[in-house]
Structures are given as structure tokens and as C-alpha cells.
Amino acid sequence: MRRTPKHSLGFSLVELMVAIAIGLIVLAGIATVFMAQRQVVSSSSAQGAIQNADNAISAILSPAIRGAGFTGCGTLAQAVNSVTTPPPGISYSTWATPWVFSRGNFSAPVFGFDANGTDVGGSYAITALNAANVTNGGDWTPALTGNLAGLAEQGSDVLVLNGEAPGTHPIGVPTVQQTTAPNQFTVYNAGTSSPGASPIQFTDANGNVLHVLVTAVAVSDCAKSSIFVPAMTSSTDITNPVAVAAIGSHGAGNVSQQIAPVYQDGVQLAPMQQVAYYVGSGNGGQSALYQAVLVGGQWQSQELIPGVDNMQVLYGVGLNGQITQYLSAKDVQALQATPPAGVTSLPFNPWTIVNSIRIGFLIEGGLGSVPADSNPKQWNVLGTTITLPNLPPPNSAVPNDTRLRHVYVMTINLRNTTL
């Protein structure tokens, strides 16, 4: 009997090609869904990071701005400022321009510097991401002084606040020794019932010890205050009794070693800070918001929030605590030469009539948080147009850098200007 030969079972070439085509279509669909989901995740992550940055900015700056001008139980309006550094070549005895910023100048709750060309209606083109800080103080108006030049990137404003260190609680002064030279004030240390412990430890309202960077201290009886640089053994350690530091020490020092007026036993002592906020070159490849505290005549800087591309500041000014207009730092400074109607006391420090601060930020998310070529190329930050043009690698800006960006604005009143 004849047998039929057996043949191998399998796919024909046509069947194989059809199967491959179907597989590729399925894979393409899966890849499309995966990329879409990945984009959603990246965008959501960036939005979350930007929201966290917004919250962090508000949590840090809001109490600092609200508390600017506070001196324990008084305000800078009641204070005698013994701390200042005149410009090079000018002696303490002949310098009488309090409206000109200097290290340790506590003559006003706030000082500001406007990046040239960025006041309302102006513009700035960011030519490099995470650009190097610039040393030319003339890139700001008024010129960036007091050793601040070299800390900030070009194109962003700089804000300086004066007041009691945020979160701290004044401590009592049971013994005032102003009959000796230098003046001395023996204080209760960290809220204890017996004076004299050294170094002094400042606390929060709950009695928790805080390690506070100190620019100066204020002694106050709530009707008047005096601000001076104390003798210190480190950036946080003040010896007890508190002694007035030698004239001109610490870079930003005291005009005199004699504190006037005279205080009685039982006044308060509060730690004072001069703090600068600015955008500088960051450590992680992104520009960042920085805080710098003046200690011993030098700025001790700390990166606060990465991913801040730009900062613009406007100042609400007006007499008697009434805000009549918001101005750039350049325009506030110009009021010194042309004071508003109602100013009778000259020379006039225009920074003493700042009642509110409006501050805006351009904040960026991570790479890949938006599709390529879909980002806008410019943003409006408090009336200033910030542009990121197409740049060649490695500084590729929008639309090629695929970073989600967002403008965050907040307005905060200085609660101490009317006290």
C-alpha cells in the first residue's frame, strides 16, 4: 500500500509577515499608551514639585516679610540704629545717607534692588539656564552694594529684609549696666529664671532652643529700641552679659560703643537679622532661590528652593500706612529726590514708606514634564516679560528643554509699618 509522505507544519512567508505586522501595530499601540502615561506622570510630578515650591516660598517668605521691621516689642520706626557700614572712604561721623543700603543698615524694614530693564513694562531674556552669578553691582538699580554683588544671577531682583529673626522669642534683661563702658546687658538665658548663663540661647514661643544666625541684637522697652552688634564668639554665640562690640568690628559694626538712650532693668533683648533673598546659580543644575544672612559683616548664603528661574519684586508705598501705588525698587529709590506730598522731614528715606511687597517667581519643573516644542517662550512676571529663547546645547531653553514652567505671585503686607 502506498503511503502519503509527511510534510512539516508551519507558517508560510505571507502568514509570518502578516503576524509581524500585527505585532508591530500592537507594540506601537502599547508604546503610544506607555509614552502618554509617562508624559502624564512626568507632568503630574512636575506640577507637584512646582506646587511644593510655591508652598515653600510662601512658608519662608510670608512670615519674614510680615515681620520685617519688628524689634522684639517695638519697631524700627522707634529704633536707634547703631549698626551701619558707610561706603569706602567715608567715615562714620560724616556719613548721613540712610536711604543708601549698606551692610547692617537697619534704618528701614526693607531695601530692594531692581534688575536693570525689568521694571513694569520691561523685559529680560534668559540667555543661559543656571547662569553664573554676576559681580557687577551696576546691573541693578540702585546699584547692588554691601557685598551683595557676586551672589545673584543677572535679571532677577534682590530683596533685603530687616527685623527680628523669624520664629524667635525675646528674652528678658534683668540688669542694665549702661554706666560702664562698653555698655552691658545681663539677660535671662533661654527663658531661665536666673541670668548669666553663657552663651545666650534664644528660643521660640514654646521655649525650644533655636540656633539663630545673628546680625545684631535689639534692646527694647516697647517705647524705644536700640540696635547694635554684640560681642560674639561665633556666628550664633553671644556672650552673657551682652557687650557692645568694638566700633567697626565684624565688617558691619557699631557707630559707637555707647548705646543711647538709657534703658532701665527689665527690658527685652531680641536677635536681629539682615536677610537677602535672590535668585542665584544652583548646585543641582537649576537656578535656585537663595537666602543670605549677614553675620559678622559677611553674607552666609543657603540654597532654599531649586528650579526658580526668575524673581521680580514690587513695593507698595504710601504715607501713614496707606498704599497708593506699587513701584519697582528703582522707582522707590527715586522718591528720595522727589518725596511724595506730605513729607516734611528731610532727608527722606523712601524705604520707610514701603507698606507691602508683591513678589513674583518663574518656577520650572523637571525635564520631560511637557512635550518637546509645546512650551511657551515667554512669561509675564509682575508686568515684566521673561523670555527663554531657543539656545544651543547644553543650555537648550524652551521649547527644547521640555520643562513645565509656572508663574507664582503673592502679596504680603508689612504689619509693623503702622505700629
Image: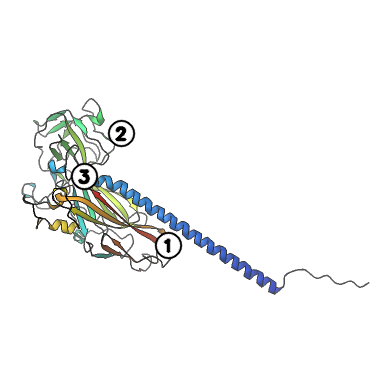
Q: Which residue is mark 3?
A: 415
Q: On screen, 207 above or below 108?
A: above
Q: CA distance from mark 3 to mark 1?
A: 40 Å
Which quarter of the image is occupied by the C terminus?
A: top left
Question: For the residue labelled by badge 2, is the local secondary structure a helix, a strand or a loop?
Answer: loop
Amino acid marked by disc 1: Val
Q: What residue sits right under mark 2 in the picture?
A: 208
Residue visible at 6% across and 47% down? 93
Q: Earlier in the sequence, mark 2 or mark 3?
A: 2
Which of disc 1 and disc 3 is earlier in sequence?
A: 1
Label 1: which residue? 370
- Mark 1 is surrounded, within 10 Å at the Cα level, by few (under 14), some (14 to 19) or many (20 or more) other residues, namely many
Residue 31 in sight in this render: yes
Alpha-carbon distance for marks 1 and 2?
Answer: 44 Å
Q: Amino acid at mark 2?
A: Asn
* Picture disc at residue 231: none
Which amino acid, mark 3? Arg
Rendered image quadrant of residue 255: top left
Residue at 22% across / 56% down in the picture? Answer: 314
Residue 43 x, y percent position in the rendering = 44, 58
Which mark is in front, 2 or 3?
Answer: 3
Q: In the rendered image, which quarter contains the N terminus?
A: bottom right
Q: Secondary structure at mark 3?
A: loop
Q: CA distance from mark 2 to mark 3?
A: 25 Å
Q: Is residue 379 left or right of residue 401?
A: left
Q: Is residue 143 at all visible to an observer of this figure?
A: no
